[in-house]
Image (spheres, grey):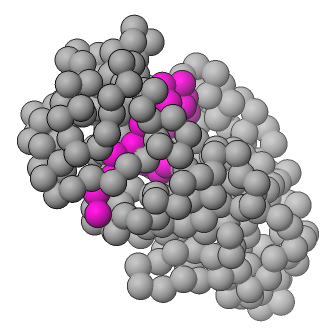
Amino acid sequence: MPLLYHWVGRNYRRDLDWGAGYHLNQSNPLLHGIEPGDSLWAFTRTPSGKYVLAMDLVVRAKTRNPAGYRYGEYRLWGNLEKSRYFRTDDQPDVSGLIRQLSVRASAPVLGRSFQGHAAVRRLTPADHRVLAQYARHLPPEPRARLLPEEELEARILLGDPASVSSLIAAEAPGIADERRRYLFEQAPRRNPQHVRELRELYEGMCQLCKWNPRSLYRQDLCEAHHVHWLSRGGQDELHNMVLICPNHHRAIHRVDAPFDWADESFVFPGMRKPMRISRHEVQAHV
Ligand SMILES: [Zn+2]
Ligand SMILES: [Zn+2]
């Protein structure tokens, strides 16, 4: 079942400023009524008051956030290959288009029909076709390009701001200045300390499989992974990090396995992998 989503303008802009997240949160359980492979069509309002189509999020996975999470309990993760952010600057207003769909949207200002729980609505297959047809020739949003997360984590761990800064400049021109400074100034300064703390807490073991390189090789070989990826708006904080072995770390990045905060597990295609050791709280931030 495809869905329509009203993405509050400031949240949409923050998403692009911090590194496109390709995920959405909501308190309405209808958000989880969608099936993997279906589209969630998000529209938003520009600062000039125009409504535009922001994204076709082709759903990859559904997970839950921890209780009390401010943006709601339900989260959707987009398929990174199929989902598209659209350029919004030169798009015409889509209010008329949205009012044509089967969703009831009669408020004079479109957004008023999509407040609170009503921000997410069911779409019919015919609605989906109308939107897909409209979006066929929309240019992609250049700021939604993804940074390579493995490379970013590795460079931040080196503690070398110049190296992080050159990666961001080359790969993600759309990230806002404040976020860039965070990634190439604050994060490299603190990250090695976080990694040391995690290794102490878990005695060097992988939280997923308990592989213990300290006892096997007298070496620290497990790595810190940011469950909400840094390149997609995550924080370089202990509560956003887990300690995992290099094999699990590669697998998580290569298949883009989302994290489910509700039961602390990674969601791989066809299987969930829960943390086998958990001695610190993993929290959702944005
Ligand atoms: Zn492991
Ligand atoms: Zn990682």
Q: Position of residue 4 (x, y in %)?
A: 34, 46
Instruction: Please tell me which residue lies in front, 196 or 58.
Output: 58
> Which quadrant holds the C terminus?
top right
In this view, 157 is above or below 6: below
Q: Position of residue 28 (x, y in %)?
A: 54, 54
User: In the shown orientation, is residue 225 left or right of residue 32?
Assistant: right
At horizontal 81% and vertical 42% (from top left) the residue drawn is 190
User: In the shown orientation, is residue 57 left or right of residue 69?
Assistant: left
At horizontal 41% and vertical 79% (from top left) the residue drawn is 269
In this view, 270 is above or below 187: below
Q: Is residue 61 in view?
A: yes
> Which quadrant holds the N terminus?
bottom left
Which residue is most to the top? 48
Q: Position of residue 8 (x, y in %)?
A: 50, 30
At horizontal 75% and vertical 33% (from top left) the residue drawn is 186
The span picked out in magenta is 1-24
Instruction: Please tell me which residue lies in front, 14 or 177.
Output: 14
- Image quadrant in which you'd find residue 197: bottom right
At horizontal 41% and vertical 85% (from top left) the residue drawn is 270
Instruction: Confirm whether the magenta stretch covers residue 243.
Output: no
User: In the shown orientation, is residue 247 left or right of residue 157?
Assistant: left
- Image quadrant in which you'd find residue 218: bottom right
